[in-house]
Image (cartoon, rainbow, N blue to C red):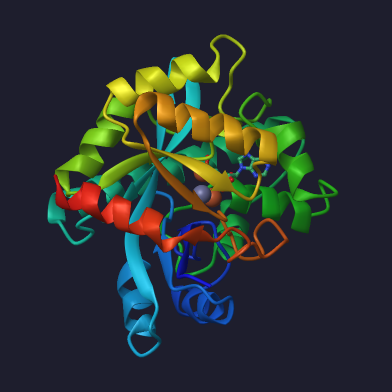
């Protein structure tokens, strides 16, 4: 078999539950030749992951997952082959993480209004000491731990999902701002899990066209949540708009219960194309 990669992996510096070291060990066991670490709004896992990978013959691709907003709808944008040590980039990420803390408190306030009493300290405990990027998956897990929901999915559908009563927006990076932020550190920006995009007011095709015009260079075709029909639809869109194709599991450790690492394996050829695009910047 040729070399394979998983290009979408979270660690416990954001809302995954596995440490960067553990992720690298598991990736090796899964037979992966490369993984991209793509935590939400932080690159704190990249140095420890590179350290852990040193004697393991596995490549760590530095990445990040940013949240953007297009006409009131949330979209996620992945950045690959970024210069993760660039100081103004790190400062921006730190600011985004500070906003996350305020937003998490706001979500807890809203839940409180609905009679669900959760403490911020409890949330921090769930998130763990390595997290600098607190988010909704932590809140979902806290709701579960406190017996307020029967599963993680229910936490989102009932309380904190994009259209649910305790949802609070994070901040308003436009797709172009997100793409520019990634471009400024030499990275390639990719639309994450297009399946999650709200297509009530606009078909996905139109949204992808807009995003391509805003500087997004790729689309995540392969993802744990995509079925075969979606996969061909997204592949077709990539062709139509000249976008790079990527794919990954979007593993959050045990954060979503099932460990997804390595469940999506893309051929190394896609990694090389991403790298070439980054080199061309
Ligand atoms: P945040 O960045 O804080 O808005 O949280 C985003 C996290 O919540 C990501 O890890 C998503 O995968 C997760 N998430 C969003 N919607 C859902 C959902 N309906 N079910 C499970 N996880 C979700
Ligand atoms: Fe996440
Ligand atoms: Fe995402
Ligand atoms: Zn993700």
Res 145 → quadrant: bottom right
Instruction: Give the image location of residue 53, x and y in percent.
Output: 38, 82
Indicate left or right for 281 with 111 as reference.
Answer: left
Q: Is residue 229 visible?
A: yes
Viewer-side residue, 268 vs 9: 268
> Residue drawn 62% across and 13% down?
200
Residue 29 screen position, x and y as percent: 57, 81
Q: Residue furthest bottom?
A: 55
Q: Position of residue 189 (x, y in %)?
A: 32, 41
Q: Nearer the viewer, residue 68 or 195?
A: 195
Query: Where is 1 relative to 160, above or below?
Result: below
Seen at 36% across and 73% down, the residue is 59
Q: Identify the residue at horizontal 35%, vertical 70% (top origin).
A: 60
Q: Is residue 111 visible?
A: no
Give the quarter of the figure containing the C terminus: top left
Q: Specify the farthest residue to the front.
A: 1
Viewed as shown, does residue 261 lie left or right of 192?
A: right
User: In terms of depth relative to the viewer, which is nearer, 151 or 79?
Assistant: 79
- In the displayed structure, 155 sits above or below 84; it is above
Q: Count every numbered label the image shows and give the total.
A: 0
Image quarter for residue 219? top left
Q: Nearer the viewer, residue 1 or 223?
A: 1
Q: Residue 34 location in percent, x, y?
A: 41, 69
51 w.r.t. 156: above or below: below
Q: Is residue 115 left or right of residue 200?
A: right
Relative to 14, residue 89 above or below: above
């Amino acid at each position: 078999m040729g070399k394979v990669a998983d290009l979408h992996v979270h660690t416990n510096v954001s809302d995954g539950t596995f440490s960067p070291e553990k992720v690298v060990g598991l990736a090796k066991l899964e037979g992966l030749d490369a993984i991209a670490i793509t935590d939400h709004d932080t690159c704190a896992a990249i140095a420890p992951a590179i350290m852990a990978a040193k004697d393991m013959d596995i490549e760590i691709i530095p990445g990040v997952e940013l949240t953007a907003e297009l006409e009131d709808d949330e979209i996620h944008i992945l950045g690959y082959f970024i210069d993760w040590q660039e100081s103004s980039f790190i400062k921006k990420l730190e600011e985004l993480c500070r906003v996350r803390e305020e937003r998490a408190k706001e979500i807890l306030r809203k839940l409180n209004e609905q009679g669900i009493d959760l403490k911020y300290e409890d949330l921090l405990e769930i998130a763990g000491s390595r997290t600098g990027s607190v988010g909704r998956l932590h809140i979902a897990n806290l709701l579960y731990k406190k017996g307020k929901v029967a599963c993680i999915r229910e936490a989102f559908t009932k309380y904190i999902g994009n259209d649910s009563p305790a949802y609070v927006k994070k901040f308003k990076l436009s797709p172009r701002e997100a793409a520019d932020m990634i471009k400024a550190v030499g990275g390639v920006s990719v639309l994450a899990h297009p399946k999650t995009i709200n297509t009530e007011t606009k078909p996905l095709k139109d949204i992808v066209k807009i995003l391509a015009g805003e500087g997004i260079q790729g689309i995540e075709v392969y993802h744990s949540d995509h079925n075969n029909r979606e996969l061909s639809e997204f592949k077709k869109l990539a062709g139509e708009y000249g976008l790079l194709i990527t794919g990954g599991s979007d593993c959050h450790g045990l954060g979503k219960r099932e460990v997804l690492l390595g469940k999506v394996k893309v051929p190394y050829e896609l990694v090389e194309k991403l790298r070439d695009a980054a080199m061309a910047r």
